[in-house]
Image: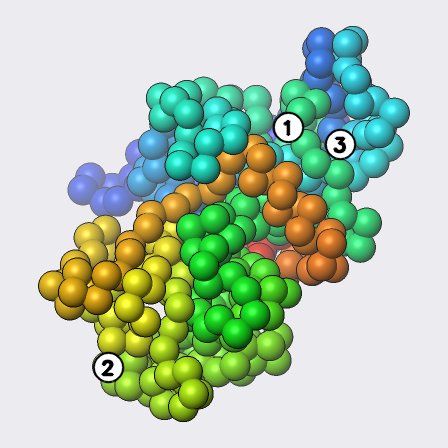
Amino acid sequence: MPHILTIKHKRGKPGAAPYYPLQLSAVPTPTPGPGQLLVKTAAAALNHRDVFIRQNLYPNISFQAPLFSDACGEVIGAGPGCTRTAELINKLVVLTPFRGWAADQAGPEDWAQFSTIGGVGPHTHLGGGQTYVVVEEDEVELLPAHLTAAEGAALPSAGVTAYRALLTKAASAAGPGKSILVTGIGGGVALQVLQFALALGVDVYVTSSSEAKLARAQELGAKGGVLYTRDEWPKNLAKLLPAERPYLDAVIDGAGGDIVVRSVPLLKPGGVISCYGMTVAPVMDWPMQAVMKNIELRGTTLGSRVEFTEFVNFVARHGIRPVVSRTVKGLDCVDQIEALFEDLKGGKQFGKLVVEI
């Protein structure tokens, strides 16, 4: 029997912050319509947005839409009018995690039409947390041949966000001989930025609150790392930079807070801060030192449909394997999925957390 994993509304104690429980429901197998594919989901991955959805901290949450924006599955059927059936049938594909952004590098062509999938409206039938999903045939990409389904599920949101943050927003730093700082290593986006940058010959430095995560990042190829929990971390990082090039070309950041103030002394004049999230604080300081040094702060999130194709091709071309921290087997193992959420909330993961369906 096919299943769907959603959140359900449940009143908590008065004044307490909500945390909606998970709910597994039996549903009929969907039927693809014209131009649509039927995909049997093989794996789905968690993102921080899934925690925010359960906390009622994400826009347009839905109690009907399956959770998880990231999924990989096998195409097992096609509706009338599909033009890619021969290419896709019985093949593993990754699903695009958003809708309404075609190609404009500046941002979605119409912000009002841009939306994500998984646990939110208006796409209440879309999300990785279900046994079968029906999608438009132009909303999938073939899984790179060297990857498993679990690795494929780890790609979509983190991968396109990392690709855009580095190769679109900080393109001047994405090449041999350049140096960047990636903050908060261990998260899915940060790790994929690290992997993409290494594939391009960039020297990568990282921050973390964990010595173990710094060590693992260096095993992957990072030049060095520092603990951001120490006030003197910018000075500690400066000591790691080579004497012949003692500065950074860019910072790829998902934390926000005081990152601009702290990184300005490390950046070259005209350096770039590419910010894809603000987990520390929703407001960032912008000091005069950044103005005088011509630093550029560039916000970025997810990417266009064109960038999604480009990044999947990049992964295939360079043989990149996204880091999977832990998997659980079965959409019906709700307690184990709940444990993945606890890992994410506690920052215990190094890589992506995946449900194998």
Q: CA distance from mark 3 to mark 2?
A: 49 Å
The disc, 1 or 2, on the residue closer to the chain's N-terminal end is 1
Q: Is residue 286 left or right of residue 93?
A: left
The disc, 3 or 2, on the residue closer to the chain's N-terminal end is 3
Residue 12 makes an appearance in the image: yes
Residue 231 image label: 2
Q: CA distance from mark 1 to mark 3?
A: 15 Å
- CB-based contact (under 8 Å), mark 1 and mark 3: no
Could you say which quadrant of the image residue 16 lies in? top left
Q: Is residue 167 left or right of residue 228?
A: right
Question: In the rendering, at what x and y percent does residue 73 appear?
Answer: 74, 37
Disc 2 crowd, CA 10 A, few/some/many (<14, 14-19, 20+): few
- Which amino acid, by three-letter code, is at mark 3? Lys
Q: CA distance from mark 1 to mark 2?
A: 45 Å
Which of the image's four quarters has the C terminus? top right
> Which residue is under mark 3?
40
Circle count: 3
Residue 142 versus residue 211: which sits nearer the camera?
A: 142
Nearer to us of marks 1 and 3 is 1
Residue 65 makes an appearance in the image: no
Local SS, label 3: strand
